[in-house]
Amino acid sequence: MAKQPQPISPVKNFFAGGFGGVCLVFVGHPLDTIKVRLQTQPKPQAGQPPLYSGTFDCFRQTLVREGVRGLYKGMAAPIIGVTPMFAVCFFGFGLGKKLQQRNPDDILTYPQLFAAGMLSGVFTTAIMAPGERIKCLLQIQAASGEIKYGGPMDCAKQLYREAGIRGIYKGTVLTLMRDVPASGMYFMTYEWLKNILTPEGKSVSDLSVPRILFAGGMAGIFNWAVAIPPDVLKSRFQTAAPGKYPNGFRDVLRELIREEGVSSLYKGFTAVMIRAFPANAACFLGFEVAMKFLNWIAPSL
């Protein structure tokens, strides 16, 4: 059984979740850029080496060609979407818990926490899908050398002009397939580790910074262990030329398995896992610090 935190406050969760999300993007975006470039690199011609031999080669080439700024390409799109997305994410998790409680004092089981986390994944997709589409396009154009988009807003305008709202939301189903189970694992793991790390007789709200960082970082690892295969399909599908995959993710999956094998579904694994711990540790620490600050300045909010 899991001990529950204080009742959720939508307003506090909006600001605290947004701050946590900004922390996550700032810490994790460089390796997210590496992940997307590894996932979307073209298949090499016969006898030719791949564009990137691995995570560290991609990191080195990006630094040499584009400098540190190259690692932060496309960051504006997730930053713009982060505050409302994480607000909705944490609000969705709280709502999912409340829907399963008959009484406010009921303690939820871990499967119930998993289900509450899955609801948060549904809530965030409306914001996440277009942000991911724009981010991926901006990240790979710098690697290809062909500059089509001047920035996030220009990218969104061009996508809308070319294919309407469907062009902006391309990859929504794959985003759902990635985020719904992964979010369940994310929040359940965080709550589980917080309970394990809380000393006997103490409250989870009194956890030390290192323990919060560890719980948040491990939650990120478990999240991405579930999310990587659909994330590879999503990145490939969202950056493909219009009409390349008429049957959606099924065509992407068939092509990847046929040409590169099952291991292709774990492209970018090293970059993802290196990024997952510090980025999500920063996210949950930012969230917890912001919540304590908001509880201090506005306890009745």
Image (spheres, rainbow, N blue to C red):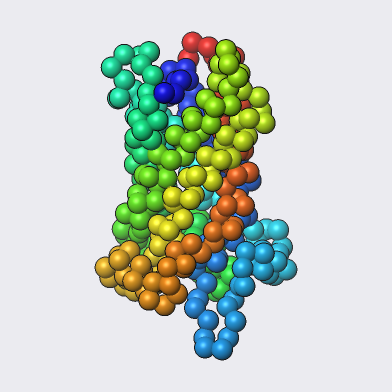
Q: Nearer the viewer, residue 136 or 217?
A: 217
Q: Quadrant of residue 198?
A: top right
Q: Is residue 235 above or below residue 131?
A: below
Image check: 249 left or right of 30? left
Image spot of residue 59 (x, y percent): 66, 63
Q: Residue furthest bottom?
A: 47
The quadrant holding residue 112 is: top left
Residue 202 placement: quadrant: top right
Quadrant of the image containing the N terminus: top left
Left or right of 127 on screen, residue 270 = right
Q: On the rendered structure, is 121 left or right of 17?
A: left
Q: Is residue 119 above or below residue 97?
A: below
Task: Tell how many labels.
Answer: 0
Task: Residue 255: give x, y in percent of width and height.
Answer: 37, 74
Residue 210 shows in this picture: yes
The x and y percentages for residue 217 are 58, 40
Left or right position of 133 against 254: right
Q: Residue at x 57, y 12 (%)?
A: 201
**Residue visible at 61% across and 68% down?**
54
Residue at x-position 38% and y-position 13%: 105
Residue 267: image location, x then y, percent: 51, 64
Q: Is residue 120 visible?
A: no
Q: Is residue 172 above or below residue 47?
A: above
